[in-house]
Amino acid sequence: MTNRFGWTRREWRALRALRTPVGIQRALEAMPYHVAASAWSPRRVLRERTAHCLEGAVFAAAALRALGFPPLLLDLVAVQDTDHVIAVYRQRGHWGAVAKSNFSGLRYREPVYRSVRELVLSYFESYMNLRGERTLRAYSRPINLARFDRTHPGWMTSADDLWWIPEHLVGVRHTRLLTTAATRSLSRVDRRSLAAGLVGFRSH
């Protein structure tokens, strides 16, 4: 595959060497969680070898693009909690995801989900805050970052932060996940499940 996106040959080979979505996820898992108010480009993540949720998802989308997938992001919205961004892809008609998270259950998903909603629901039980509340409430449609090749050329290799990506995600229409009645009846996560979700958690 030809590099049309401004990567150096070495960088492009590194992305192509990941080979599969699982390989991209393994690369993200090898990176320490980056706790900072930043929006690094995929090139910056590749060079610094660290990322947080947003940066990991944008990096994963760029890496998926290098493997021939469209660079798709999906926004998950929570209450009393932080939102989460994941890179999504389709194989054999089913949806999967690659993601970086401080919570162990909010990362990779195998491509076994028949719809975006099914994929999103797979995150519900693991999406919790530190009080043990189940917090996932809505999700966006998949956003193809290729649409920004003209308005933000070189976004994958930019030296500047990509704050316009989360700003765009916030502005797109989101689909509500739960009814009001279902939300009111939610129970808290038990202590063992919360402890499992916090394996590897980094607060600073």
Image (cartoon, rainbow, N blue to C red):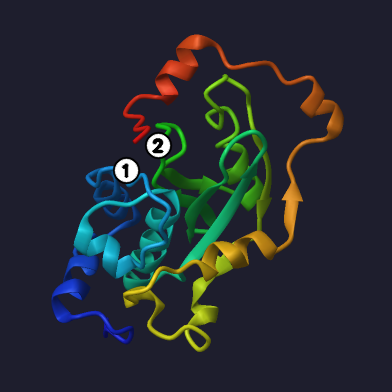
Residue at the outermost left position: 10
Residue at point 33%, 66% (across, down):
42
Say the numbered circle drawn on residue 188: none
- Disc 1 is placed on an element classified as loop
Q: Which residue is mark 2?
A: 102
Q: Percent position (x, y) of residue 159? A: 32, 75
Choose top left, top right, bottom left or bottom right for residue 181. Answer: top right
For the question of whether residue 98 can be seen, the reply is: no
- Mark 2 Cα within 10 Å, few/some/many (few <14, many 20+)? many
**Of the residues shown, which amino acid type is indicated by label 1?**
Tyr
Foreground residue, 77 or 175?
77
**Quadrant location of the N terminus in the rendered image:** bottom left
Q: Percent position (x, y) of residue 115? A: 63, 51
Q: Which residue is mark 1?
A: 33
**Quadrant location of the C terminus in the rendered image:** top left
> Where 148 falls versus 195 (above or below)?
below
- Mark 1 Cα within 10 Å, few/some/many (few <14, many 20+)? many
Q: Of label 1 and label 2, which has the lower sequence position?
A: 1
